[in-house]
């Protein structure tokens, strides 16, 4: 760990050139989330374009798996580019990473689909996703390290928090480009070829990013160390082969970044999924609700980053994890109350059971969506979960047919429930609403925010974003300060990308898999609650406070 001190030769205000460093470094985060939201929003279209040889449901699964591949390889990119950054330098390493990220996104817009070049199309797409994930693994660590090593003592939390705010800018940018292109071209043309335009337009952002980053100088802290011949010649060995540093990597992961990752993804992405897939809010309204909460909450990244310079990184991050873990369940229940009150009432007043021979029922846990269910018991439960019906499974006599019991009404299950009108009628009679029913929140335009139902939802979602800003605002400064200069890039990148890429990135799919397997629409929240609480405990006992560290050592 870097040396603890309250003084630094760089104390004082930041120069104009150093402010430019923040802007240039943050462009990579804009690019990251522009691509992330772009691909996630267009996954269904991408599935149809590149996996057209498969049935529609399978296409979507493959498209999402290609998306997930970018998350899974992030830690490997952290190791590869972290090593280069600690040997060659910060500037040139994250210049290379943004080139790879940008070109990978741009080439998707040029890539012929499966109807044109066959199996080569999905293979190339997956390769591009892997390259994007690898480059991203080296991008954040480089940007955070570069900004922190330019920042004056006592203001690292404030300056590195600007990197965190640009994630929201990337989300907004991609949303605006998609909406504008769809509006101009119309849905048929957009689905056929117009979806390529947002990917192709990314080359403008890439060009600006590269031009600006070419104007940067090397980090003064790294350059001084290199000039003195103190740079690491084997950063991987020093970072992970040395127990004193490897222990800090583990503490950073489990005592900080793991909790930050699950709180971050719950507050922004699982909240969106919960609104759309579970509460049956239309996509336009759900996206507007999230957009407003982000707009209101984004400035708090800087607030909590600056506050961490005064009271410390550790108390803010751990407080954010703890408060989130203690309030996720009541907040999501209140979201249900306001977004779909009929569904909440049906869940409270209706008892739904799947009665079946236990031997005929399997495990529905399916976080990557690749399993295919064929047993009637599994199909019935899967349908109920996708319909946001709370249910339990009751053992029936051996060999007995599957029955769905809605209060006192028993419905024999003889076909997929989606085509079984008796099941739908029983659920409707019990009060379960369908997508589009009256009472489910709906916004007619972006400024339709003053109705009590809408305002309450934006307020609740804003609270979730506030938790995100608490845990994410100070995290970059904390990670930079935790490790010595010569292996900082390598050491901080790995825990960051495991915490965010694995624990956070896999949260939406895993949480819904928990919902499907338990029959409880709120059960998926146990995933972030559990990991956030683990972080609170480990962080409280083992994570050191870093705000007064001298990172020039």
Image (cartoon, rainbow, N blue to C red):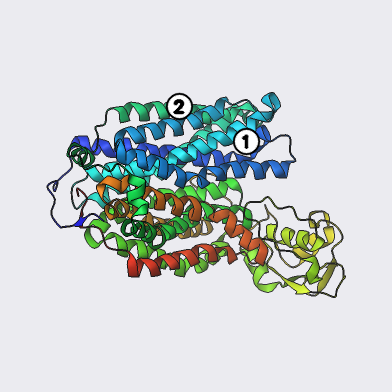
Foreground: 8 or 175?
A: 8
Label 1's element? helix
Q: Is residue 450 visible?
A: no
Whether residue 328 sits left or right of residue 298 in the image: it is right
Q: Is residue 230 visible?
A: yes
Checking the image for residue 536, the label placed there is none
Label 1, label 2: how far apart the Cα atoms are? 19 Å
The residue at 71%/44% (across/down) is 58
The residue at 59%/51% (across/down) is 442
> Label 1: which residue?
46
Whether residue 492 sits left or right of residue 1 in the image: it is right
> Label 2: which residue?
203
Image quarter of residue 517: bottom right
Cβ atoms under marks 1 and 2 closer than 8 Å: no
The x, y position of residue 13, in whole percent, is 15, 45
The x, y position of residue 204, in whole percent, is 43, 26
Foreground: 526 or 421?
A: 526
The residue at 32%/32% (across/down) is 92
Up/down of 518 relative to 61, above or below: below
Label whose residue precedes the other's in the sequence (1 or 2) = 1
Label 2's element? helix
């Amino acid at each position: 760990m870097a040396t603890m001190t309250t003084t630094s030769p760089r104390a004082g205000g930041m120069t104009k050139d150093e402010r430019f460093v923040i802007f240039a470094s943050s462009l990579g985060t804009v690019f990251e989330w522009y691509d992330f939201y772009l691909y996630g929003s267009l996954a269904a279209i991408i599935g149809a374009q590149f996996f057209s040889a498969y049935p529609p449901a399978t296409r979507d699964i493959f498209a999402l798996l290609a998306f997930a591949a970018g998350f899974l390889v992030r830690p490997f990119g952290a190791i590869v580019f972290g090593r280069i950054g600690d040997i060659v330098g910060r500037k040139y390493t994250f210049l290379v990473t943004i080139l790879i990220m940008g070109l990978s996104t741009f080439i998707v817009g040029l890539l012929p689909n499966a109807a044109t070049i066959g199996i080569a199309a999905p293979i190339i797409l997956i390769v591009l996703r892997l390259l994007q994930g690898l480059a991203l693994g080296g991008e954040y660590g480089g940007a955070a390290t570069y900004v922190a090593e330019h920042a004056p003592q006592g203001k690292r939390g404030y300056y590195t928090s600007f990197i965190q705010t640009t994630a929201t800018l990337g989300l907004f940018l991609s949303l605006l480009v998609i909406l504008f292109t769809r509006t101009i071209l119309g849905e048929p043309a957009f689905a056929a070829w117009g979806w390529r335009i947002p990917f192709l337009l990314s080359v403008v952002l890439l060009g600006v990013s590269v031009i600006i980053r070419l104007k940067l100088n090397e980090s003064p802290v790294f350059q001084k160390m290199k000039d003195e011949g103190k740079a690491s010649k084997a950063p991987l060995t020093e970072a992970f082969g040395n127990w004193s540093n490897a222990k800090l990597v583990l503490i950073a992961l489990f005592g900080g970044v793991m909790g930050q990752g699950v709180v971050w993804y719950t507050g922004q992405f699982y909240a969106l999924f919960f609104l759309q897939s579970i509460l049956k809010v239309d996509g336009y309204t759900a996206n507007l609700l999230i957009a407003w909460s982000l707009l209101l909450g984004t400035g708090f990244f800087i607030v909590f980053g600056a506050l961490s310079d005064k009271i410390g990184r550790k108390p803010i991050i751990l407080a954010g994890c703890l408060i989130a873990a203690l309030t996720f369940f009541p907040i999501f229940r209140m979201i249900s109350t306001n977004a779909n009150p009929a569904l909440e009432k049906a869940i409270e007043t209706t008892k739904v059971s799947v009665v079946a021979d236990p031997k005929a029922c399997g495990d529905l846990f399916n976080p990557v969506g690749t399993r295919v269910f064929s047993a009637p018991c599994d199909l019935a439960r899967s349908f109920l979960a996708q319909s946001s019906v709370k249910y339990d499974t009751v053992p029936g006599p051996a060999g007995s047919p599957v029955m769905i019991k809605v209060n006192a009404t028993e419905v024999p299950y003889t076909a997929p429930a989606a085509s079984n009108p008796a099941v739908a009628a029983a659920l409707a009679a019990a009060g379960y609403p369908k997508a589009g029913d009256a009472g489910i929140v709906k916004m007619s335009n972006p400024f339709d925010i003053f109705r009590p139902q809408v305002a309450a939802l934006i307020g609740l979602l804003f609270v979730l974003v506030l938790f995100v800003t608490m845990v994410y605002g100070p995290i970059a400064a904390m990670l930079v300060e935790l490790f010595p200069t010569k292996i900082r890039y390598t050491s901080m990148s790995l825990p960051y990308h495991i915490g965010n890429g694995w624990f956070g990135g896999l949260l939406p799919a895993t949480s819904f898999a928990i919902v499907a397997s338990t029959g409880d629409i709120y059960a998926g929240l146990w995933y972030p609650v559990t990991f956030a609480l683990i972080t609170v405990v480990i962080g409280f006992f083992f994570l050191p406070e870093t705000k007064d560290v001298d990172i020039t050592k």
